[in-house]
Image (cartoon, grey):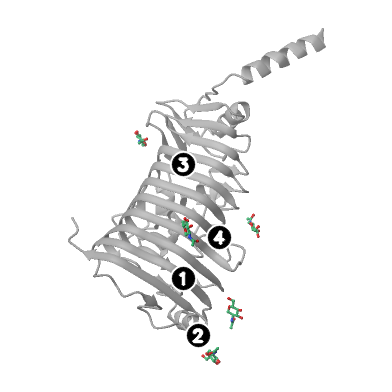
Amino acid sequence: MFLLTFALLALSFSFVLAVDPCIPTPGGWQDLDDAPSINAAIVSCGARGTIIIPANSIFNIRSPIDFTPCQSCDFQIEGTVQVGHGNWGFWAKKDFFQFKGVKGARVRSVTGTGVVDGNAIEYYTQRFDSGMFEGTNAFFGFTDQSSEIRVENLVVKNVMHRFFRIIGNSTNIHLTNLTLSSVEQWGAYPRNEQDTVGIEIGEASNIDISAIDISFQAAQRTRGPVGVCIAFDRGARSITVRQITCTGAFGGVLVQMASIGWNYGTPSPVAVENIHVSDLDVDASLATGIVTYPAVTTLRNLTWENVYVRNGNPAPVELCWYKSHSFTPWFSTCRESVNMTVREVLFKGYRGKVQETPASGVSWPYTPYNNMTSVELRYEDWVPGTVE
Ligand SMILES: *[C@@H]1O[C@H](CO)[C@@H](O)[C@H](O)[C@H]1NC(C)=O
Ligand SMILES: *[C@@H]1O[C@H](CO)[C@@H](O)[C@H](O)[C@H]1NC(C)=O
Ligand SMILES: *[C@@H]1O[C@H](CO)[C@@H](O)[C@H](O)[C@H]1NC(C)=O
Ligand SMILES: *[C@@H]1O[C@H](CO)[C@@H](O)[C@H](O)[C@H]1NC(C)=O
Ligand SMILES: *[C@@H]1O[C@H](CO)[C@@H](O)[C@H](O)[C@H]1NC(C)=O
């Protein structure tokens, strides 16, 4: 009898679990962690099912959302998922939405009302005073060969460090129609340069990014540009980026080895290749180009096309960039010893606050680094104009 009851209970329990879509219920307080109920929904409906964060609801998370059970799941955010306040030490080295080896996922708002709020203004204003922690985390972290993932139609704001980070040989990742913004960021140059990154890509391939609006704004008291809109680090390959606006940033869309960390990535003969960026409207100190930490490697086949420059240096290329402004002695020894090849780089169709088309050539317009390094850049169709 007992066994029979148990079996019936188990049966009805699994029946309840199998209901699709799964709609978790929020606890209603920032101090309550809604992650376990969202994670339970992903466990129940993750295999080709649908999970819905309903409209007009607020879910507070105080621990990561684990998408591992998701196989071709559809995760719909129509309400708000926000990070519970005051837990920053806990998050220091953890991603918030974790995609570890996930094959197939769609994260989106169907109705257009979905918001993901990193809630980190409190963190931005405190961290340097308290000297809290080193390192950066991602809100959406794609690792461990995740693949076939689409994120679309969402507003994401005020995350701790990175909105999206794609690493771990992840592939076939599609990000489209997203608004990424942060306000009240620490703006005291140069600490802020790398504090925030919109989309950061390391060892990963076949990434398609389109229709993304990225804006960063420093706090009034510190001012200055903040963060980098899109950074390609070591291992980034086969990437198309189009229709991007980038506002208030230090860096626009840049190749930037060491964005993820000083020793990030497996050394390989070609570090970054096959990147095509087009239709970019950018207001940043460094709009496009290559500003990187040096490595013995090659960067190749990088194109920026149709770029409207509102502000800043349109297309700098400096292989000894990192911390060059704060460590001048390092900069000159770096330039003497850097051993790198940069080729098939094209900056085409630049408008706005730009000069006439620069001359193409090897190592132009910089003095050659040394006899081990070659930098080949091409420039086409630059037309200076007034910026509205
Ligand atoms: C883009 O996303 C917003 C919500 O963030 C939505 O309102 C809008 O309809 C979406 N546009 C397209 C073309 O899907
Ligand atoms: C990615 O793949 C390369 C080449 O197979 C390998 O050397 C590297 O360790 C991998 N990286 C990760 C993080 O899996
Ligand atoms: C250059 O990169 C683009 C964009 O990824 C790719 O379509 C093209 O085939 C690459 N060309 C070469 C010669 O590698
Ligand atoms: C420079 O890098 C090449 C590989 O790209 C390597 O063969 C060469 O030994 C390096 N030179 C020095 C001085 O490190
Ligand atoms: C490169 O320059 C160094 C001095 O800067 C010199 O000792 C070396 O012989 C040069 N190598 C070649 C291949 O020209």
Towards the viewer: 15 or 185 = 15
> In the image, what residue occupies the spot 28% across and 65% down?
381
Q: Earlier in the sequence, mark 3 or mark 2?
A: 3
Tell us which disc is closer to us: 1 or 2: 1
Mark 4: few/some/many CA within 10 Å (<14, 14-19, 20+): many
Q: Earlier in the sequence, mark 1 or mark 3?
A: 3
Q: Earlier in the sequence, mark 1 or mark 2?
A: 1
Residue for badge 3: 85
Q: Is residue 96 depicted above or below 371 in this figure? A: above
Dividing the image into 4 quarters, which one contains the C terminus?
Answer: bottom left
Residue for badge 4: 235
Secondary structure category for the residue under label 3: loop
Towards the viewer: 170 or 97 = 170
Towards the viewer: 313 or 32 = 313
Q: Earlier in the sequence, mark 2 or mark 4?
A: 4
Residue for badge 2: 371
Label disc, if present, on residue 343 of the rendered structure: 1
Mark 1: few/some/many CA within 10 Å (<14, 14-19, 20+): some
Mark 2: few/some/many CA within 10 Å (<14, 14-19, 20+): few
Q: Is residue 292 left or right of residue 145?
A: left
Q: Position of residue 42 (x, y in %)?
A: 59, 31
What amino acid is labelled 1 in the image? Arg
What amino acid is labelled 3 in the image? His
Q: Earlier in the sequence, mark 4 or mark 1?
A: 4
Secondary structure category for the residue under label 2: loop
